[in-house]
Image: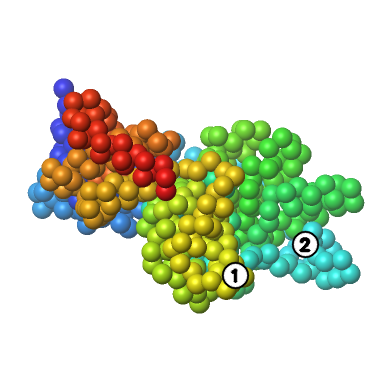
Amino acid sequence: MENEFEKVWQNCLDVIRDNVNQQSFKTWFEPIRPVKLNGKVLTIQVPSQFFYEWLEEHYIDLLKKTINKELGPDGRLEYSIIMENSYRSTNPYTINIPAVNAKTKNPPVSMPIDLNSNSIKNPFILPGLKKLNVESQLNPNYSFDNLVEGDCNRLARSAGFAVANKPGGTAFNPLLIYGGVGLGKTHLANAIGLEIKRNFPNKTVLYVQSEKFCHQFVDAVKNNSHNDFIHFYQMIDVLIIDDVQFFAGKEKTQDIFFQIFNHLHQTGKQLVLTSDKSPIELIGLEQRLLSRFKWGLSADLQVPNLETRIAILEKKIYADGIEMPKEVIEYLAYNITTNVRELEGALISLVAQSTLNRKAITLELARQMIDKFVKNTTREISIDFIQKIVSDYFNLPLELLKSKTRKREVVQARQIAMFFAKNMTKSSLASIGLQCGGKDHATVLHACRTVNNLIETDKKFRVYIEEIEKKIGNQ
């Protein structure tokens, strides 16, 4: 039998579902669990402090309205964080903070550090220089200003910006940013560092590739300056390590980084890490290190959708002072779907072709360049691309195809797009449904069955499918 508090929360979810998009609902509301109802106070359990802070920042008004609708004007909401130990009560709309035990997770690392000492060797010092000279090693071109925000990076970017405004003072320490090649991990990591330098000029910020860290450690061992190496890194206020997956299999390096990590974390310093995989997928790293990576927030970067790819190109073109027809920009965005790096590479190639051959940038030149650009690689068909072909075939606006309208002609076109997306892409049913009007996986399966039935029974419909298939294959 359903408890009263579960019933109240389910009624709240029914209202919330109609006021946020499906992805936001799945990310921020499905993980919440109702705990108890005490009079007019509903207690809900959230996975982390960051989760709570995000709800308070972005959905507090919606939560208040739904609670008041269910429990009346005196209705209140309390939170509990999943951590360890017991919880204590707090005021309405505030967080239940776990009681602190006398036992700490990690005893402090006892290593005396004299910040004013010049005897500590700096692994970043240039040959011939004798003084301590800590440069941030940040790339000034990788700032927040030229990082285009989209659904693919919104969580990671928001978390990064929060860290930049309060380094070491947020719930997401460490901040681990992970994702595939060319999706902007290095850009975002540098942007965080640059923003911290701008906001807190006196803080020592250091960006370092994990491979460079490994090489420095090897040199320190050879030169018998092992302690100096540790002391130097413990002096850093904000340490940014790029591509931590390269620590895999290097036990001594992991051991040293473990010591540095513990010291920085316990002294309130900020750590920002990047990886090509989530912590749970990282192989070859010690469990004690992986567990620390999970203390803060792990935020993933995904492949940018069509709108984000167009925005990236437009920003790049504007910054470089290039004039380009909108149809060419859209053509590039539709055809280069794998990552941002390849998208920018295609743009550079097109501009180079235009400049070297003294030709205007046209759609035809873009087609020729794209054919060469993807000639030796397997061409990946995207859901966006399929939707564009289908909407053009039926002479429907693309926005209408992606909407939730139930008009018969739009529904059929949407079902056809789902059918081809399932058969021609590697996307999950949930992902296809999300991009085709915010539908669920069951709707996608129903659409595919409907299209298959019509192919077998309706000759005219079968012609539609064959013609659209040719258009997708020939583009």
**Residue 245 horizontal/vertical position (percent):** 64, 42
Of 441 and 358, nearer the camera is 358
Tell me the amino acid under the disc marked 1.
Answer: Asn
Kindly identify the residue that appears in the image at 55 percent across and 34 percent down: 281
Viewer-side label of 1, 2: 1
| 366 lies left or right of 59 | right
Of 70 and 455, nearer the camera is 455
Kindly identify the residue that appears in the image at 69 percent across and 41 percent down: 247
Tell me the amino acid under the disc marked 2.
Answer: Phe
Q: Which mark identifies residue 124?
A: 2
Identify the element where label 1 is drawn.
loop
Kindly identify the residue that appears in the image at 56 percent across and 53 percent down: 373
Residue denoted by label 1: 357
1 or 2: tag closer to the N-terminus: 2
Of 344 and 39, nearer the camera is 344
**Residue 49 horizontal/vertical position (percent):** 40, 48
